[in-house]
Amino acid sequence: MAKQYETVIGLEVHVELATKTKIFCGCSTAFGGAPNTHTCPVCTGMPGSLPVLNKQVVEYAVAVGLATNCTITQYCKFDRKNYFYPDNPQNYQISQLYLPICRNGHVEIETENGKKSVGIHEIHMEEDAGKLIHDEWEDCSLVDYNRSGVPLIEIVSEPDMRSAEEVIAYLEKLRMTIQYLGASDCKLNEGSMRADVNISVREVGAKEFGTRTEMKNLNSFRAIQHAIEGERERQIELLESGKEVIQETRRWDDAKEYSYAMRSKEDAQDYRYFPDPDLVPVFISDEWIAKIKENQPEFREKKMVRYKEEYDIPEYDIGIITDSKHMADIFEETVAICKQPKKVSNWLMGETLRLLKEKSMDPEDILFSPENLAKLIALVDSKAINSSVAKEVFEVMFAQNVDPEKYVEEKGLKTVNDEGALRKTVEEVIAANPQSVEDYRNGKEKAIGFLVGQTMKAMKGKADPGMVNQLLKELL
Amino acid sequence: MSNIISDETIEYVGILAKLELSDEEKEQAKKDMGSMLDYIDQLNELDTTGIEPMSHVFPVQNVFREDIVTNGDESEKTLKNAPGEKDNMFMVPRTFD
């Protein structure tokens, strides 16, 4: 019988924190600035410059640690990790080796195979490197240090996962938790969340772990899934043919769906860690931890239960709305104003999702305010505009967060409720469409639909279809 | 000297430090490193049972910055430190992982 293998997976997840400034200097972390416009002597590693820790980085790291059931290292410090690479201007990265800020945590994940707990070995704070571009034309490399010094936390899991599904569930859990905390937007495709995957295989029942490889450059859930499946196969093939798995770092090529070895064992890195003498230790008091705990938001699981009790909306809607903290906030704030959860949910589940998909946007990018959504709902409720006009207004509101009341006023989109004017138009339509009128009178009920349409067209959409229908029936 | 640095070690340290040493420099470095380690060995003679490892020489902790942008565009100054420049970026010898 063929041997049965088990995949053992552990993750190192880097998350870019949502601070306004870098971890050790007052440079902006804004994405997309012209090269090197967010740099200073500190983040370009100039001799004599002095790093000073951004307090918000500690707060975010502790918040994530508490949300993932970690023990906070109340006395923690920074170490230098020495290596040479042009995107690392100091020739060392400031990180934490000996006393990482959080340790011994866990999160609960759920897959088709049920619930399980994934251990978190540690979370540490560190700085990001710059961006290196290889210039084929000049045969040189170009460096932009805007990203150098952007704060990161690295979340190191225990080797507790056994399948790609579990890895994805774990990453989703982290993403959701961190987004709810507002500590990062966690976008894999934009690099604000990056996962390095450690994989080994062993025979089912074996006690020892197999030799592991580390897979880098995975920037989508699809890439992660394929890389794990591919690496499992590669390692099993090696073992089956009597060869050994070599401990190495491999880089995933998403286009080719293939990984190749990055660094061989010979030039394995020797980081020569030592405490950073420029940075003083951080002491996190019980009071400070208590304060951060107090400010933790309501997380998704609790929110889902509360929504079910508080608002009468389908479970499916609850799942989608709470999948994004931003969308959940918009939902709650709009409901607080208009008290109509079902209608708010309908706008979010219908038009909002449709437009997000059409424009390839994330729920986090929703621009319109709860106030404006509530106003739009009120306009429809009071029959000031009909539902097709409302959709039109919504599209503009979605794009520019316009005030729907003002917009409807300015563009003259209000439904004509003046029965006299409407009656006149209906009479005109009846006079102009004798065939349809006859059809209707001969029992073809459907013909009235055409006449309603003609009337709406003549009214430029600004009529209440119900009222038009009623008038037509009365006059025919 | 009780600490003898091997040829392999000096070669390896050279690779890590990105230094190309001549044979004389290698010999000198081996001697210097050996005596440094001898000096450090003296510390091992002390009994440090029950003493917390020191992580900083000053009795200071929690020096923070608030998360407020204080720096503007200093790219011109930054790029003055570049060995070469192209498109507002540092130009360096071609480097690969």
Image (cartoon, coloured by chain):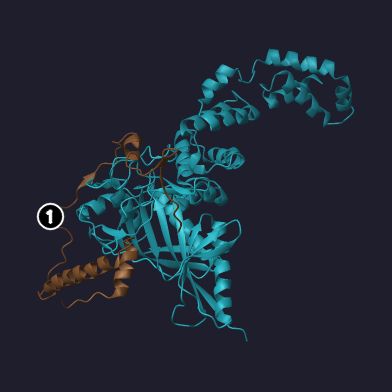
Chain colours: A cyan, B brown
Q: Secondary structure at mark 1?
A: loop
Q: Amino acid at mark 1?
A: Phe
Res. A104 in view: no
> In this view of the protein, which residue sits in the foreground, A333 or B79?
B79
Mark 1 neighbour class, 10 Å CA radius: few under 14, some 14 to 19, many 20 or more? few
Q: Position of residue A369 (x, y in %)?
A: 47, 33
> In this view of the protein, which residue sits in the foreground, A447 or A267?
A267
Q: Is residue A24 above or below residue A281?
A: above
Residue under circle 1?
B58
Res. A174 in view: yes
- A257 displayed left or right of A108: right
Q: Chain of mark 1?
A: B
Residue at image point 11% right, 73% down:
B42
Q: Position of residue A370 (x, y in %)?
A: 47, 34
Residue at image point 79% right, 19% down:
A475
Q: Position of residue B79 (x, y in %)?
A: 35, 39
Q: Position of residue B18 (x, y in %)?
A: 34, 60
Q: Is residue B74 above or below residue A59?
A: above
Quadrant where the N terminus of chain A sits is bottom right
Quadrant where the C terminus of chain A sits is top right
> In this view of the protein, which residue sits in the foreground, B75 or A303?
B75
- A196 displayed left or right of A72: right
Residue at image point 54% right, 33% down:
A398
